[in-house]
Amino acid sequence: MDAQIWTYLLVGATFLLYIIIAIISRAGSTKEFYVAGGGVSPIANGMATAADWMSAASFLSMTGLIAFMGFSGGQYLMGWTGGYVLLALLLAPYLRKFGKFTVPDFIGERYYSKNARLIALICALFVSFTYVVGQMKGVGVAFARFLNVPFDTGVLIGIGIVFFYAVLGGMKGITYTQVAQFCVLIFAFTVPAIFISLQMTGNPIPQLGFGSRGPDGVFLLEKLNQLSVDLGFDSYTAVDQNNLVNMFFITGALMFGTAGLPHVIVRFFTVPRVKDARISAGWALLFIAILYTTAPAVAVFARTNILNTLSNASYEAVPEWFTNWESTGLLSFEDKNQDGIIQYVADPVVNELQVDQDIIVLANPEIANLPAWVIGLVVAGGLAAALSTAAGLLLVISTSISHDLLKNYLRPDISEKGELYAARIAIAVAVVAAGLAGMNPPGFVAQVVALAFGLAASSFFPAIILGIFDKRMNKQGALSGMIVGIIFTTAYIIYFKPQLGGPGLPENFWWGIAPEGIGTLGMLVNFAVALVVSRLTTAPPQEVLELTERIRTPRGSNNTAAAIH
Amino acid sequence: MASNNAKRYWRTNLKYLAVLLLIWFAVSFLFGIVFAEILNQFRIGGFPLGFWFAHQGSIYVFVILIFVYVYLMNRLDKKFDVDEI
């Protein structure tokens, strides 16, 4: 069987599985719809969180980014994992004890203010929507490339699948589908990596393989460094001293952003007890770490393979996969000096080969001559990653509208049945809106993902941390902190992003910090403003002090939750 | 729970947090970024040490930190009789 048939077979089988799970785990109440009834086991929740977290970008693009960045690519690896330490230690247990459904719930109640709830609500909507549009686009691209359907049709199929299980099952359906999707995506990512590691180093564990010796007895990384330097690229493992401040800040913004993203935080409302929330974050990070420690190994294997096979190769004699991928435009060769040999070097004037970063994961099985079913598996894995993230985000959007906006802001007297109905309509509208936006993406969608992390870091993270750890923090402090943090971060990002119409030039970056990293500074500004303002204004009321006291100890978490519904 | 006990429980929690977050900061921001150049002079297998922390080691330490915290807090909850059944 060829790769095409395998792809149809594996994608079809996994989709069928997701739909069956969705039918089995329909939601019957708002509590099931919002937080899966609050009874998900910590390990299952860990897997669901991991699938929710690892998006199409983690699965398809990150490895490629690292392969081309070398050492500096570590900012994504540390940034997208380190936030879970903050979540487990500083946020998840206390928010679980608080026992409600959403981040705006917490902000609104801890800061006894409808305006605070509204600001949190708008941020949550903005962050989740920009993020989900990117996922829908990812689904469309994956379908278009592998199933030979038009891009728009690909997005439509994606909408159909997510629509079905998210509207039907709510958080309950999504959680159990995500468990299945995690298994598919992690299997799809590690299987090719193990094969390639064996081929190149004889060690089946990729995490160890890329620090081992190749068949010629030379350490793989030393060989890669040598190859890179010979062709004029930077040494792969060398530290880029001029980029250190920037790398520091980007790593920070991704970590604090992760810990402030509403669709990640809400996962910890789904487990039964406070101690489950703590351990659940641990399981989630363990499952995420499987992919995040394999990715840098794959990056090294792929980079070495590409430099080895393509540099100074005769164009006539390139392997078959090269020609296959040329037709997609992800790989292009222009014979500038007409010698029929591929010059792949750092100097852009002489260089004749352009390699898109997405190709690293997608073409890797072919580059390494793996069997056809592995290629189908990688496609199914990429789709699982995109769909699971999209579903989690859509749920946050629908919860924000039906619970935070409707139930707690506009119509507090709405019945539970009415609220569940509204939640289903909201998620249906959100799926379709995200799909349409994904089909027709405004050019800046990719750019605003930086804004999503920056906003989460500079608005939610400090407000939640202070709400738990600083009893004296009051409405005035938290509100002014959030507003200043948001305005500062947004202004800097828009000013320095030409794609968003900003006039700023990279040489004017403050201390060399790129817009992607400014959330770290925005977060510090938020903390400073909040602390100063809160000390100059009146202390929060007695019942808020009692709430803060209550969320600090685990016992009674079920009563807190039961009191709501 | 008497308020004196509550204070002691919370203070112990903060002490754990301070130590664990210090390690969190050290392995990523310090070993993986600020001092990576210096650490790269040393090797662990085929890896330059600074590079290893940025691409592997910090992630392993993150996972361990969470499980250590879970263990410490479960013990502390029991000791102060605030654990859940």
Image (spheres, rainbow, N blue to C red):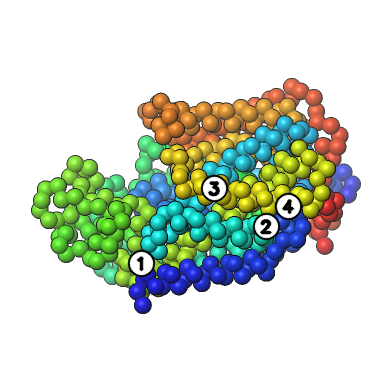
Q: Which is more foreground, mark 4 or mark 3?
A: 4
The local secondary structure at tag 4 comes to helix
Name the spot of residue A414 as percent of width and height, x first.
80, 45
Residue marked by disc 1:
A365
Pointers 1 and 4 in contact (CB under 8 A)?
no
Residue farthest toward the left in the current orientation of the protein: A339
Front one among A87 and A484: A484
Per the model, the C-alpha gap separating discs 3 and 2 is: 17 Å
Q: Which is more foreground, mark 1 or mark 4?
A: 4
Q: Amino acid at mark 3?
A: Ala
Query: Are marks 4 and 3 in one subunit?
Result: yes
User: Between disc 1 and disc 4, whose residue precedes?
Assistant: 1
Pointers 3 and 2 in contact (CB under 8 A)?
no
**Quadrant occupied by the C terminus of chain B:** bottom right
Front one among A386 and A26: A26
Q: Amino acid at mark 1?
A: Pro
Q: Amino acid at mark 2?
A: Gly
Query: Are marks 2 and 4 in one subunit?
Result: yes
Q: Residue at x 36, y 42 (%)?
A: A240
Q: Residue at x 18, y 55 (%)?
A: A342
Per the model, the C-alpha gap separating discs 2 and 4 is: 11 Å
In the rendered picture of this protein, how many numbered marks are placed on residues? 4
Per the model, the C-alpha gap separating discs 1 and 3 is: 32 Å
The local secondary structure at tag 2 comes to helix
Query: Would residue A369 be visible to someone looking at this image?
Result: yes
Name the spot of residue A538 as percent of width and height, x first.
80, 24
Residue marked by disc 3:
A434
